[in-house]
Amino acid sequence: MNRIFNLDNGFFRGLSKLVDCAYLSLLFLISCIPLFTVGAAMTALYYTVQKVIRKDRGYVSSEYWHAFKTNFKQSTVIWLIVAAVGILLYYDEKILDVMAEAGNPIGKAAVFFRVLLIFEAVWCAYLFPYMARFANTNKAVMKNAAYMAILNLPWTFLIMLVMAVFALLVYIIPIVIFLAPALYTWTINLILEKIFRKYMSEEDRIAEDEMNREYKN
């Protein structure tokens, strides 16, 4: 009986993680409201999932806002670039769709812009987590995230599948939006960390593993 109500058992640990995910998702959604802060919010979301949800280091609120403030400038600049490109691609696609409906053969090029939009979405799945894990220049961040997405295509396709599943889930059950951001990020974190660790030096990997062990002990 004592084991059932032990706060360290699997059930209560899982419940605690679920509550943390709900709280983290709420923080993320609130900090996305100005729209121009979406990049900083996505970076902070990944950072908090990696450090608090997965590694049990620190607290959701303090770590989230720490990462949000620390990465705000760079994440916002890159997000505005990404958003501008995305808007341009979207309207190019829509214009070509109209041309296709009118019978203009040039309208078939809309498929090209759809593919670019999909690639940009997947690129973002690498881009903001990369900023949460590595310090680099804006140019290097965008270039390295794109290289990782291309050089790890099997994992990239899996991330695309995860994105599609969560998008469909939110579409079917809209209330899931209050939990989905953290759960989605947790899921792709399991994939991305396998990739990121390949690009870390042996010393950095050892230091990070040691830090995680010390915190848990």
Image (tube, grey):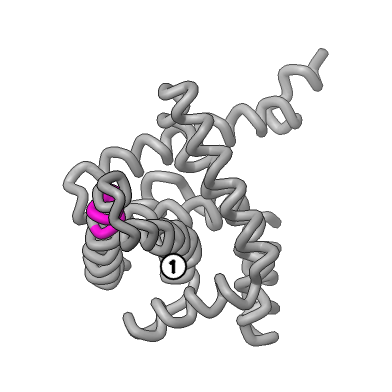
Q: Is residue 69 visible?
A: no
Q: Could you tell me which secondary element the residue under label 1 belongs to?
A: helix
Q: Is residue 101 above or below residue 146?
A: above
How would you classify the magenta stretch by its main secondary structure?
A: helix
Q: Is residue 8 above or below residue 51?
A: above
Residue annotated with mark 1: 127
Placement of the N terminus among the 4 image quadrants: top right
Residue 83, by quadrant, is bottom left
Point 57% across, 38% down: residue: 165
Residue 128 point in image, percent of width and height: 41, 64
| Segment colored magenta | 92-97
Disc 1 marks a residue whose amino acid type is Leu
Towards the viewer: 118 or 179: 118
Placement of the C terminus among the 4 image quadrants: bottom right
- Is 81 situated left or right of 44 in this image? left
Point 47% across, 56% down: residue: 46
Point 66% across, 32% down: residue: 14
Towards the viewer: 139 or 88: 88
- Is 157 situated left or right of 34 in this image? right
Residue 167 point in image, percent of width and height: 48, 38
93 inside magenta stretch: yes
